[in-house]
Amino acid sequence: MGRFDISCALAQTIVTAYGPKRTERTEVSFGNIQPDESRENPYARDDEIPVLNIDTNEKIQRWRQYVQTVRPFFSQNHLIDIDGTVSYPVDEVLAQLEGKVKIPILIPGETPKSSLLSTWIQEYGLCADIHSDGYGYVFEHGPPCASHATPRSLARFSARAIEHLPQYALDDFERHINPRDTWREVELARGVMGTFHTSCGPYCTSSLTWDYQGVRYSISGISRQPFMVRLANSAIEAGDRRLGAH
């Protein structure tokens, strides 16, 4: 059905309105526990969770009316590509990076059109962070810069000079792949080779990484491989966006 934001206050209101009933043994995913590799989802545990007491026709009708008003902030349907492309907000990104970054700035000129993307880049906030050896930016659902690399992020872009990367990033981290992960090499524009990696814990996120002109670029978030490849190719083909760059 998708991913929903439900606050503690809203959950308490619902429990107060309907009341708890019996419990059901339910698989719950956590983001901060030791993975159990014997499970299909290593980050899941079973717990006894109370269910709502919806046992009268009046409650059933009230519940049906209520859930129709709740919409997911993200669902798999959002990842469906639509024919065509949309322009990428290059000027908005450059306004935050221009003159502050010493490495080549790669920004897509256009992106695949999807049921989610147009809304994401037009209505949600851009958050950028800049370092002496790199930069990153993301369009976030919710208050910009409230958090990074969360399931709220459609695609986060980052770049860092290879000479300043920590040793663990330079090592062959394929040995750290979990059983549910995927890993493959992909060919990008201008003959650049990249690595696509999907990591699955409580939810699955993907990344596409490539080295270009002494910089390691990466796109990460909740996106499929074809979508990320088209974003990367557009950025590579556009070249360095810095003023006066050739």
Image (spheres, rainbow, N blue to C red):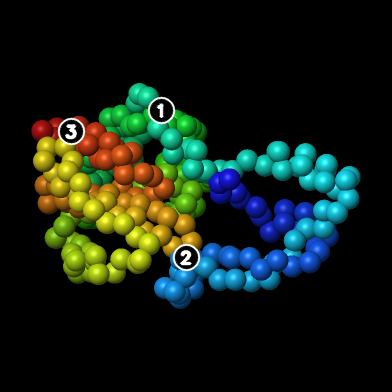
Q: Is residue 85 above or below residue 207?
A: above
Residue 37 in the image: x percent, y percent?
Answer: 42, 73
Q: Which callout, 3 or 1, points at the residue further toward the start of the chain?
A: 1
Instruction: Mark 3: give few (<14), some (14-19) or many (20+) Cα within 10 Å.
Output: some
- Tag 3, which secondary structure? helix
- The amino acid type of the residue labelled 3 equals Glu
Image point (67%, 42%), residue name: 70
As measured in the structure, the alpha-carbon distance from the residue carrying label 3 to the one carrying label 1 is 22 Å
In this rendered view, identify the residue nearer to me: 124 or 195: 195
| Residue found 44% across the figure and 74% down from its top | 38
Instruction: Determine whether 66 is above or below 199 in the image.
Output: above
**Residue wearing tag 1:** 82
Q: Which residue position holds label 2?
A: 41
Q: Can you see residue 243?
A: no
Q: Residue at x 16, y 50 (%)?
A: 211
**Label annotation for residue 237:** 3
